Image: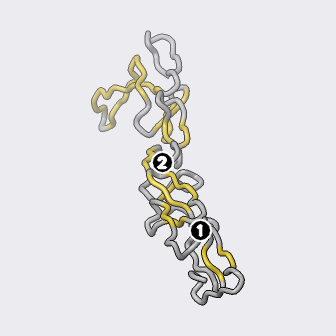
Amino acid sequence: LYSPDGIECIACPSGRRPASLSVGLVEGLEQVLEDATCEECPEFFAGQAGECRRCPSGKQPNADHSLCVPCVPGFAGVGGACLQCQNGTEPNGLNSTCMPCRPGYAGVLGVCERCRPAFQPNADRTVCTRCPQDRYSPSGLECLSCDAGYSVNSSQNGCEACPYGRFGTDGVRC
């Protein structure tokens, strides 16, 4: 609460708190008097009715500091500060920390996407790369070799049996 006229106390608007003035020392203790104005909640804080609280993990203040809102996609954080996740990582379920992209996923700027069939994530999980011609990927998880008697199909998402009368021992050529 603050008092603009020194008579009546009223609540500060959402996202604001009473401003204080330090007026010196009295017997070793600092006195703080409420000023006749309100100030914005500090960085990483949000509040209602003149009370500002630090935002919890996975959230940050909205533009007017009235509410704590979830970190935007690709961002995670603690204590009201959301930071963008590095390439090859994404926020965990609570948006409190960044985790490596899940198997079969790759991404940049904190957003991981599933790799398509015939592709697999590169080592740092930043991009999906096409399987070599002699390998296949049915789910985008990893590139595999065909068994003997089979070869990679043209879509590189599975294997097909060698034609009648032909056989392959390496899973590549019939």
The image position of residue 79, as x and y in percent, is 47, 47
- In this view, the residue in front, 98 or 25, is 98
Name which of mark 2 and mark 1 comes first in the sequence.
2
Q: Which residue is mark 1?
A: 156
* Residue at the extreme front: 165
Residue for point 52% across, 45% down: 73
**Could you say which disc has been placed on residue 22 in the image?**
none
Q: Is residue 76 above or below residue 38?
A: below
The image position of residue 106, as x and y in percent, is 50, 60
Amino acid type for the residue under numbered disc 1: Gln
* Residue at the extreme bottom: 169
Residue for point 56% across, 71% down: 142
Q: Which residue is mark 2?
A: 75
Amino acid type for the residue under numbered disc 2: Phe
Residue 28 is at least partly visible in this image: yes
* Residue at the extreme left: 24
- In this view, the residue in front, 93 or 68, is 93
- In this rendering, would 167 be left or right of 4? right
Q: Quadrant of the C terminus?
A: bottom right
User: Which element is circle 1 on?
Assistant: loop
The image position of residue 7, as x and y in percent, is 48, 10
Q: Quadrant of residue 114?
A: bottom right
Q: Are marks 2 and 1 in contact (CB under 8 Å)?
A: no
